[in-house]
Image (cartoon, rainbow, N blue to C red):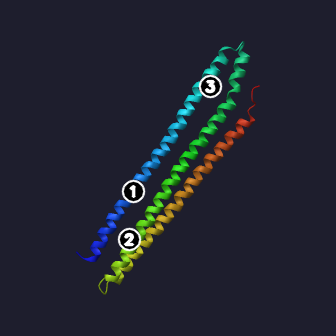
Amino acid sequence: MFPIQDQISIVTRTSLENQLAAFAALTNKTFEGMEKLFDLNINVVRASLEESSVIMNQLMSAKDPQEFFSLVAAQARPTAEKALSYSRHLTNIASGTQAEFSKAAEAQFEETSRKVTRLVEDAAKNAPAGSENVVALVKSAIDNASAGYEQLSKTTKQAAEAIEANLNAAVTQLAQATEKTPAAG
């Protein structure tokens, strides 16, 4: 075999190993995020069942319709606050998982790009005379791919930030609306 073929085989094997390791790490992060989401939902359901029982007892013990409707109205603010808290927890879980995915993808891309660049440089050293244009074309393609990935990464981060900002704005509006709701006393 030629030295360049040996290098390509080594780079290919290493790249595959890195991809498998990255896939395993991302799978673990996905399961961690799902576990957090599952725990959150279990806790919400458990608390909701307990609170529903208490509220139903209060409603059943109402002496007249006015007291009944007063009890129902009093539940609007705590319910909205719980929904607000839930959405914040959900946002934290999602943004944490997304950040881990982004970090892993960036690291994988950078490592692969570095190896491919090194391989091209080594190949260029051993390339026959007259192949400078091909080497320059390959380097240009790698640079363009890197620039494209960086732009995609920036755009994805901006989109994630915009989604998070919109969600935070909605949560803030909900919080302001619940503050305006009179608490029953």
Judge the density around disc 1: few (<14), some (14-19), many (≥20) Cα neighbours within 10 Å: few
Q: In terms of image quadrants, where is residue 135?
A: bottom left
Q: Earlier in the sequence, mark 3 or mark 2?
A: 3
Taking the image as drawn, is residue 21 in sight?
yes
What residue type is disc 3 on? Glu
What residue type is disc 2 on? Val
Residue 34 at x, y percent in the picture: 48, 42
Residue 56 at x, y percent in the picture: 63, 19
What residue type is disc 1 on? Ala
Measure how far apart labels 1 and 2 are at the Cα level. Answer: 18 Å
Q: Earlier in the sequence, mark 1 or mark 2?
A: 1
- Location of mark 1 (residue): 21
Q: In terms of image quadrants, where is residue 66?
A: top right
- Location of mark 2 (residue): 116
Residue 131 at x, y percent in the picture: 32, 83
Q: Residue at x 34, y 82 (%)?
A: 125
Camera-side residue of 166 and 95: 95
Measure how far apart labels 3 and 2 are at the Cα level. Answer: 59 Å
Q: Residue at x 73, y 17 (%)?
A: 67
Answer with left or right where residue 182 lies relative to residue 110.
right
Q: Is residue 46 above or below residue 92?
A: above
